[in-house]
Amino acid sequence: MSAPLIMFLAFVGLTLLITFWAAKKNTGASAYFAAGRSITGWQNGLAVAGDYMSAASFLGISGMIYVAGYDGFMYSVGFLVAYITVLLIVAEPLRNAGKYTMADLLAYRLKPRPVRALASLSTLVVSTFYMIAQMVGAGAIIKQLIGINFEPAVIGVGVLMLVYVVFGGMLATTWVQIIKALLLMVGALLLSYLVLQFHDFSFTKFFDAVAHADYGGSAAPKNLMEPGLKFGVAVAGPWGPIDLISLCIGLVLGTAGLPHILVRFYTVPDAKTARSSVVWAMAIIGLFYIMTTLFGFGAATIIDKATLTTAGKLDVNMVAPVLAQVLGGELFFAFISAVAFATILAVVAGLTMSASASFAHDFYSNVIHHGKENRPGQEIRVARITAFCVGAASIAFAIYLGPTVNAAFLVGLAFSVAASANLPVIVLSVFWKRFNTSGAVAGLAVGLVASIVLILLSPSGIYGKDAPFPLSNPGIVSIPIGFLAAWLGTIFTARDPEAEAKFAELTVRAHTGLGSEKATAH
């Protein structure tokens, strides 16, 4: 039995034990959807980081920096800076005014049924596309690392994720994410140490090598410290620099609208702990993204392209694992492989949890049943059934699309939808008294459609290089459209005295925590 497979099985066994432990504590909706609001600041910070540092971060950004240098590093900066938006705008009002989902905040002073219906649809779209991207990544990575075929690998990840969510709920999902974050940081620190050791712990020597990166073969050395290798006019045409700005806007604002990140703030006892958990998350994520720079730049100075070329194609997703193999041997390669697997499992579990909670709490309980639970425990049962459906759909889509689909395109769709549909209505609901239900519905619907249509019409979409829309990252267009639709939907419809009357109440609760949901004892 290979070392990667042994480590995979060890991680799976540990997480299944956690799920068994969490299942015994899932007594009631608060325990299932929000872990009883009993997670501490540092624990939630680790879980948020574990939820956020996906396979795209660990594997994709390392590969992006390996190829594009400074321009690839811009992905790391965008992912990190995004949490300032979460800390300053979203975390505290969301925790104080909501219960289980993003729509709870919107429904606080707006008409709940239309707002919850569209918020639930947006959550399902974002979560499903993000999940399909992770599933595709899982299948492709596991196939290369331990030799399991793409289809069984995708099904295996999907089944494990369903076990965590269906039986363990948010508590099991949280602890899977915490363990994954710790494993990922240990692996990243060890790999960073080995990269610096290779360069004699001299940053001068390291960056000199980065400025003269030699990939082997006939290609001339490349200066990876020079901007423009991916988004420069010479490489990407006249729209390249604008595409970079659009990418950064999408990353910075999209994170504050990602449902699987937002639901994490309901697992803590109060808003102070929510803010504390964001600070913890920023510290962990910041350190991690600094280290991805070492992976990418380090690999460019250590590994030639022939090592990463399969069937004539450069496989940039394998940069970090191959670097681990070259510097640390087979055992370290096995550990990094297991960490990649853990990364995918944790993120997929968080996505499934947010999607199932939104459908059960928002659509089933509040849209169909007008906020009245049909039978005790029915909401949890619906959430579990939804988890099965969402998981099965994601597995089927991932297998149908196959390992060659552009996973970055799917993740970009998730960020664009989150920034264009979810964020405008969250911000305007909290900070604009005149905002009404029509504005929220317009913002959610138009932002959702605009972001999807623009990505389909982009170079990453269905037309390829002949795309009518020139930007691969549509945030610079779709996000203002979402805000504009929410504003126009509000000013061109009648004022809502009830929504305006509740604005002061929402403001007090959002900033003081008076009347907010409290932790439940286990």
Image (spheres, rainbow, N blue to C red):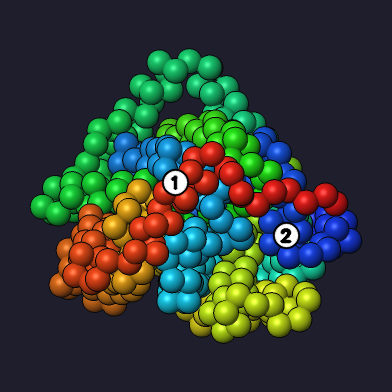
User: At 57% across and 84% down in the image, what residue appears?
Assistant: 368
Position of 196 with respect to 377 (left or right) is left
Q: Which residue is mark 1?
A: 507
Please tell me which residue is depicted at 44% across the width and 61% down the height of the picture: 109
Give the labeled residue for mark 2: 30
Write the residue at 73% across / 65% down: 29
Please identify the quarter of the rendering in which residue 170 is found.
Answer: bottom right
Name the amino acid, label 1.
Answer: Thr
Rendering quarter of residue 477: bottom left
**Residue in front for this viewpoint, 249 or 233:** 249
**Where 294 sits versus 514, above or below?**
above
Separation of residues labelled 2 and 1 (CA atoms): 24 Å
Give the quarter of the image for residue 395. bottom right
- Tell me residue 43's x, y (percent): 69, 40
Horizontal side of 213 relative to 240 (left or right) equals right
For label 1, the SS is helix
Question: Residue 453's spot in the image, x, y percent?
Answer: 27, 74
Left or right: 236 in relation to 297: left
Q: Amino acid at mark 2?
A: Ser
Q: Residues within 10 Å of mark 1 (few under 14, many from 20)?
A: some
Say above or below: 492 vs 235. Answer: below
Horizontal side of residue 429 vs 156, given as left or right: left
- Residue plotted at (54% across, 33% down): 279
